[in-house]
Amino acid sequence: MKFESKTALDALQLGAKTNLQYTQMIKNGEIPHGWYWTRTMAAYAKAGEPFGKIARFKDPSSGEVWQTAVPKKYQGKKNSVLLADISQNEFEAKDGLVILKPKNLIVKTMPEKDGWHLPDELGFPSGVASKEDNQDARYLWRRDDIGYCGLLSRYYYNFGGGRRVVVAFDRPSGRRGVLTDSEPRENKKGCPNLKPLVFEAEKELTDLRAWVKENHLERITKLVEAAKR
């Protein structure tokens, strides 16, 4: 597997892992802690508002627009999410517009707020509400101010329920880790190549310190420092 620090569009072009594949790899401890793009699409409207003909999201940082067509039978439907694993021939990208064209689309109930839910067949927390102590549950992060169309990302850290966070609000321009099957993941010493993620990891570690006690971040801090060397 190849380890990169890329944007969401890069993740699609590289053929990133799906949300379900990341779930299994995180469970097996096969990847370092960090924030990763998947190639699983999520598109939803603002809570309580119906789908129109197109689900759309504009990246406030880059101005890049991501969108997907909403099938007619789902137009007007509220509190729902369109989900699909996007292959390398199921999207078009030109002049700041990324159009997702999934062939195998599923529609699930979209929770109105962040929280713990049981996952569906794509590993998205669209099922009944649950609790953190249920190891089958996943924690959903979603936008509550506007709708979204883009890729799911996985936020993976080693405390609390951090192995099970599914993020459905990330800006496509954000540089996240990407794992693919194109090259061996390990370097010559048999260790993951962490350097591509160091810059983002340091920024995220700084953010975490605002709401997590320092003693809970000790091992993560050591990993970041080790990756710099």
Image (tube, helix red, strand yellow):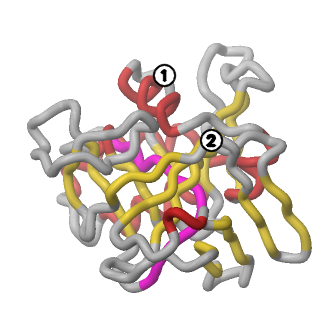
Image quadrant holding the N terminus, namely top right
As displayed, is residue 59 above or below residue 137?
A: below
- Name the residue located 64 percent from the left edge and 81 percent from the top edge: 58
Q: Nearer the viewer, mark 2 or mark 1?
A: 2
Range shown magenta: 146-157
Pointer 1 local density, CA inside 10 Å: few below 14, some 14–19, many at least 20: few
- Name the spot of residue 176 as percent of width and height, x first: 60, 53
Residue that mark 2 sits on: 104
Task: Confirm whether the magenta stretch covers residue 151.
Answer: yes
- Is residue 33 one of those drawn in magenta? no
10 or 209: nearer the viewer:
10
Look at mark 1 in the image and give the residue it sits on.
Answer: 30
Q: Secondary structure at mark 2?
A: loop
Q: Residue at x 31, y 80 (%)?
A: 48
Q: Is residue 72 above or below residue 52?
A: above
Quadrant placement of the C terminus: top right
Residue 89 rendering spot, x and y as whole percentages = 83, 43
Tag 2: residue type? Asn
Q: Would residue 135 be found to the left or right of residue 28 on screen?
A: left
Instruction: Examine the rendered structure and indicate whether residue 96 appears above or below residue 170.
Output: below
Relative placement, left or right, of 52 versus 91 is left
Number of other residues with Cα within 10 Å of mark 2, as a class: few under 14, some 14 to 19, many 20 or more: few
Which residue shows up at 38% across the image and 82% down it? 49
Give amino acid for label 1: Glu
The residue lying toward the viewer, choosing from 148 and 179, is 148
